[in-house]
Image: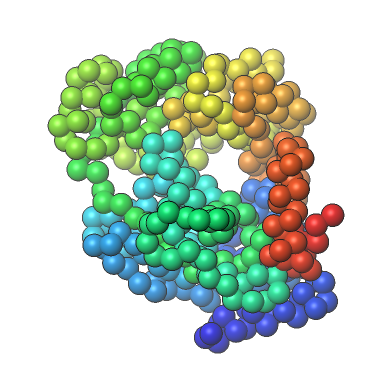
Amino acid sequence: MDAALAQISERVRDAAARHAPLRIAGAGTKAFHPDSRADRDAPALDMRALAGVVSYEPSELVITARAGTPLAEVEELLAAHGQCLAFEPPRFAAGGTVGGMVAAGLSGPARASAGAVRDFVLGVQVINGRGELLRFGGQVMKNVAGYDVSRLMAGSWGRLAAITEVSLKVLPFAPAEATLRFDCSQADALARLNAWGGQPLPLNASCWVEDGGTGQLYVRLRGARAAVEAACRSMGGELQSDPGVPQDWQDCRDQRLPWFARRAPQRALWRLSLPQTAPVLALPQGVAAPLVEWHGALRWVQAAPGHGPALAALAREAGGSASLFIAAGAGGVGAAGLFDLEDPALAAIHRRLAQAFDPAGVFGAGGGG
């Protein structure tokens, strides 16, 4: 164990002995999110000293990096070898780290087609709430017998353990890419996406947004050149040839599109995760049309906090869930956690996991109860 790891481990052991909380910290690029940290007044456990790419084998499609490694550094290295993180991790601000990326478990526009963060996590090294250094998984894809503990860290927001190192599967850039635009209503967009989903088309990402009362559906195709060209011919729509299109998709990924910028301070940003086949939702009066991603499975809604119960009920009726992504005003600092109540059985599993990883509650989720 090197000096940086030893120092972090010792701090965790000391906190556990005193039953004192620690706040896992990286670059702070997701501090706006309600789940980023429940106890913001706790002393910071800064992970940025654990930086650097440990190993990268382009031919094996695997990269291993320490938690504090800047995400931009990893993606630059991958791009130099014609490879990428296919789940398109968002960059809400400069300086985001690999550990924060996995802990947040957030994916970009390609998630519905390429998979989520957890689908690309091959292995992790963590320090648990006892200060013990543990390793799960490895650096190869394999069938997993029993619990795939490494994937538990994706989306855990640091409540189980402090991630110190991650091994990720990477993929080559697609040989060809094209974006099509369709002027259509939300209902028509969902119908089109559902129909296309049943066909052998190289769908990669989609975004429907209403601008000035007019709905526009953007569909990104990626794959073999022949497949992309054939899809463009069969699907119709207007081929987007503007050189700024790739940047538009990055702005969608990073929530910099005008739709996000128009959010009024008194409105929260809600994240509705639904089945792709879910119909248009009857949103509360006064709530504008959502921005729809992931072929209908992700719907962003701008609504006052008071609309939370109605949004949660609508999502549950459609077979999904609603959560608070950014609270109204002040960037969401001090907001409560996920809005939706957990299923009791799922909550019990979470408590048992927290008890196993962090019995003293150092990371804010231990102690069961």
- The residue lying furthest to the left in this view is 226
- The residue lying furthest to the front in this view is 145
What residue appears at the point 70 percent right and 70 percent down from the top-left corner?
129
Q: Describe residue 113's horizontal placement relative to residue 40 as left or right.
A: left
Total labels: the figure holds 0
What residue appears at the point 80 percent right and 61 percent down from the top-left corner?
367
**Residue 12 occupies quadrant:** bottom right
**Residue 15 occupies quadrant:** bottom right
Residue 3 against residue 37 in the figure, above or below:
below
Q: Is residue 230 visible?
A: yes
Residue 84 against residue 339 in the figure, above or below:
below
Q: What is the quadrant of the C terminus in the image?
A: bottom right
Q: Describe residue 152's horizontal placement relative to residue 98 as left or right.
A: right
Q: Is residue 189 visible?
A: no
Q: Indicate the position of residue 80 as horizontal and vertical percent values.
A: 24, 61
What residue appears at the point 71 percent right and 50 percent down from the top-left corner?
349
Q: Nearer the viewer, residue 224 or 215?
A: 224
Q: Indicate the position of residue 54 as horizontal and vertical percent values.
A: 39, 74
Residue 206 against residue 152 in the figure, above or below:
above
**Residue 226 occupies quadrant:** top left
Q: Nearer the viewer, residue 169 or 4?
A: 169
Q: Describe residue 230's horizontal placement relative to residue 113 as left or right.
A: left
Q: Indicate the position of residue 180 as horizontal and vertical percent values.
A: 29, 25
